Image (cartoon, rainbow, N blue to C red):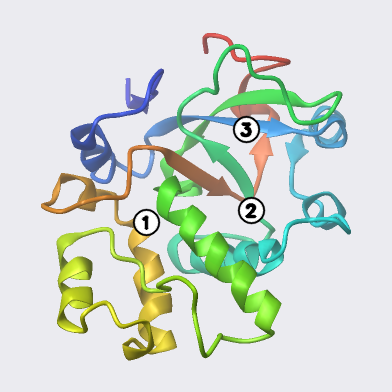
């Protein structure tokens, strides 16, 4: 069967192999969703992100900027993407003891064709989120950064930083933003100097009723 399913964090080789799998490969994903989203799925047969749920008044700084950046990447990389706000999911189930962050949260396990997913490395995504929070705080690209905005998760990126002696101001905004796109290059996992981790996330525009394997309070076997 043309299917990818991880019960534990994949090896670097498994991540590299995933980059070569066909667009039709079914990939098992896991995503926590609020009660309203589950009701939408049950009532209409499809789950999509609603803006008021994704960006409540107290949402973390930089979240909207980060989601909008990811939406732009999905537009470039997923055919027939409909410009919806992304649903976030992971390729490994959470700890069995873990519950949702709010009462009524449910964990959806679904199998999605790879062509509908944008899979990326999670650890460097956290770095991008931090950068987005700083950009929002300053109102534009900061002239002075407390962290290096350039993302170096492979040998080429680290060599680039070495050439400028890790001087933050030496790399222009456009080059820094381009470096963020390395999080989608799964084949980097098998290369020298890779430091992007083995936690994989996926974003997609919708989950349909027929995609769902199960929906429960806690992880279970797909």
Label 1: few (<14), some (14–19) or many (≥20) C-alpha neighbours in 10 Å: many
Q: Is residue 98 above or below residue 13?
A: above
Residue 83 in sight in this render: no
Q: Which sits in the foreground, 40 or 96?
A: 96
Label 3: few (<14), some (14–19) or many (≥20) C-alpha neighbours in 10 Å: many
Q: Secondary structure at mark 2?
A: loop
Q: Quadrant of residue 85?
A: bottom right
Q: Which mark is residue 210?
A: none
Q: Where does label 1 land, which residue?
A: 184
Label 2: few (<14), some (14–19) or many (≥20) C-alpha neighbours in 10 Å: many
Q: Residue at x 33, y 62 (%)?
A: 182
Q: Where does label 3 land, which residue?
A: 31
Quarter of the picture containing the N terminus is top left
Q: Is residue 212 above or below residue 62?
A: above
The numbered mark, 1 or 2, whose residue comes first in the sequence reads 2
Q: Quadrant of residue 154?
A: bottom left
Q: Secondary structure at mark 1?
A: helix
Q: Where does label 2 land, which residue?
A: 86
């Amino acid at each position: 069967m043309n299917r990818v399913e991880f019960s534990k964090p994949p090896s670097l080789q498994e991540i590299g192999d995933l980059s070569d799998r066909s667009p039709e490969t079914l990939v098992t994903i896991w995503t926590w969703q609020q009660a309203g989203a589950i009701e939408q799925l049950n009532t209409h047969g499809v789950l999509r992100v609603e803006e008021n749920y994704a960006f409540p008044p107290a949402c973390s700084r930089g979240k909207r900027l980060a989601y909008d950046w990811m939406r732009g990447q999905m537009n470039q990389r997923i055919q027939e993407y409909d410009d919806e706000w992304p649903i976030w999911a992971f390729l490994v189930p959470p700890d069995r003891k873990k519950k949702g962050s709010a009462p009524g949260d449910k964990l959806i396990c679904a199998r999605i064709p790879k062509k509908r997913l944008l899979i990326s490395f999670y650890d460097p995504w956290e770095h991008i989120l931090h950068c987005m929070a700083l950009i929002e705080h300053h109102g534009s690209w900061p002239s002075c950064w407390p962290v290096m905005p350039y993302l170096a998760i492979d040998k080429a990126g680290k060599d680039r930083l070495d050439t400028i002696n890790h001087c933050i101001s030496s790399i222009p905004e456009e080059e820094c933003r381009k470096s963020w796109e390395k999080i989608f290059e799964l084949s980097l996992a098998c290369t020298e100097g890779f430091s992007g981790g083995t936690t994989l996330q996926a974003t997609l525009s919708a989950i349909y009723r027929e995609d769902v394997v199960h929906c429960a309070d806690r992880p279970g076997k797909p």
